Image (tube, rainbow, N blue to C red):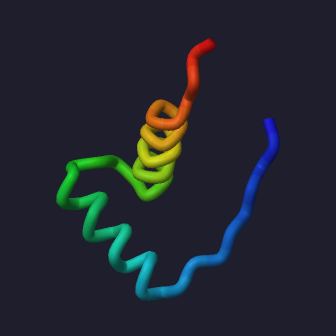
Amino acid sequence: MEKLEINLTPELVKRMDEVVELLGLDSKEELVRCAIRRYVDRYLIIA
């Protein structure tokens, strides 16, 4: 598995923390996984 590293602004990290708390998730990593999964599911074209 490849590792992708990105840099986020402090404001975005703070907002992510707020969203994690509002949604009752365990971590920012879980939020990112959920967002990526939703994006892939939304745009996946099944042939």
Q: Residue at x 43, y 58 (%)?
A: 28
List x then y, in percent, for residue 17: 34, 69
Residue positioned most to the left: 22
Is 22 located above or below residue 44 in the figure? below
Q: Residue at x 52, y 36 (%)?
A: 43
Image label count: 0
List x then y, in percent, for residue 27: 40, 53
Q: Residue at x 48, y 31 (%)?
A: 41
Quadrant of image for the N terminus: top right
40 and 28: which is toward the camera: 40
Quadrant of image for the C terminus: top right
Is 45 located above or below residue 33 in the figure? above
Residue 35 located left or right of residue 44: left
List x then y, in percent, for residue 37: 49, 37
List x then y, in percent, for residue 46: 57, 16
Residue positioned most to the front: 47
Residue positioned most to the top: 47
44 and 32: which is toward the camera: 44
Is 11 located above or below residue 28 in the figure? below
Is 5 located above or below residue 34 in the figure? below
Q: Quadrant location of residue 42? A: top left
Residue 24 located left or right of residue 39: left
19 and 37: which is toward the camera: 37
Residue positioned most to the right: 2
Q: Residue at x 42, y 87 (%)?
A: 11
